[in-house]
Image (tube, grey):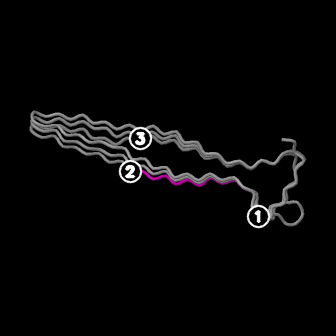
Amino acid sequence: WIDDGAIIDATDVTVKAKDETDIVSVAGAVSGGGSTGVGAGLDVGVVVKDTKAWIGAGTGAAGVTASGDVEVWADADEFIVLVSANAGIGGSTGVVGSIAVFTVVTETQAYLDAYADIDAGGNVTVKATDDLTAAVAAGSVSGGGSAGVGVSAVVFVHVNTVEAYVGAYADVVTAGTS
């Protein structure tokens, strides 16, 4: 970020925040027994991300002056694989269960703060992006001479906020053509 009151004079100004998260998570159980096989697996995860890029308030004279472009970009990426799987075998009964529960909360912001002062000879771009790729799988195999019971589940919750904005009373002057 460029903090409140900073004075920047450059050809091009780029403020970029990037956050990449890769998670592979597995919950499972394997059980066996002469008469009864019982097993359980649990996987719980919480990810909270805050990715921000910004230019703070100016001081009256142009806080950020560029003869070229000014770009403010916040970019977050998440790649998540969740697997919940189990197997249970018993001479008479096989009972297994597993669950994976994951919550991902992301906030991605790019902005020119209130009262920011920008003077660009080129373009001014304020951009926020967040890409999520998630693969989830659940499965169960169970067997026994008289009964086989298996349960598996994946619960995935994604709360996502993506914002790009110019704050109140910001002074943005650009000679850009696109």
Give the mark, 2 or 1, whose residue is nearer the N terminus.
2
Indicate the secondary structure of the residue bearing disc 2.
strand
Give the mark, 1 or 3, whose residue is nearer the N terminus.
3
Q: Amino acid at mark 3?
A: Leu
What residue does disc 2 label? 44
Q: Is residue 49 magenta?
A: yes
Real-space CA distance between mark 2 and mark 1, rounded to the nearest whole angstrom: 41 Å
Residue nearer the viewer, 114 or 63: 114
What residue does disc 3 label? 82
Indicate the secondary structure of the residue bearing disc 3.
strand
Q: Quadrant of the N terminus?
A: bottom right
Q: Is residue 116 left or right of residue 38?
A: right
Give the mark, 3 or 2, whose residue is nearer the N terminus.
2
Q: Is residue 41 magenta?
A: no
Real-space CA distance between mark 1 and mark 3, rounded to the nearest whole angstrom: 42 Å
Real-space CA distance between mark 3 and mark 2, rounded to the nearest whole angstrom: 10 Å
How many residues crowd mark 1 within 10 Å: few (<14), some (14–19), many (20+)?
few
Q: Quadrant of residue 21?
A: top right
Question: Whole-percent x and y of residue 70?
Answer: 81, 48
Q: Which region is colored magenta?
A: 45-54
Residue nearer the viewer, 31 or 76: 76
Asked if residue 14 can be seen in this view, the reply is: no
Q: Is residue 1 above or below residue 85?
A: below
Q: Quadrant of the C terminus?
A: top right
Q: Quadrant of residue 173?
A: bottom right
What residue does disc 1 label? 168
Indicate the secondary structure of the residue bearing disc 1.
loop
Q: Is residue 146 left or right of residue 103?
A: left
Q: Amino acid at mark 1?
A: Ala
- Main secondary-structure element of the magenta-colored stretch: strand
Question: Whole-percent x and y of residue 112?
Answer: 75, 57
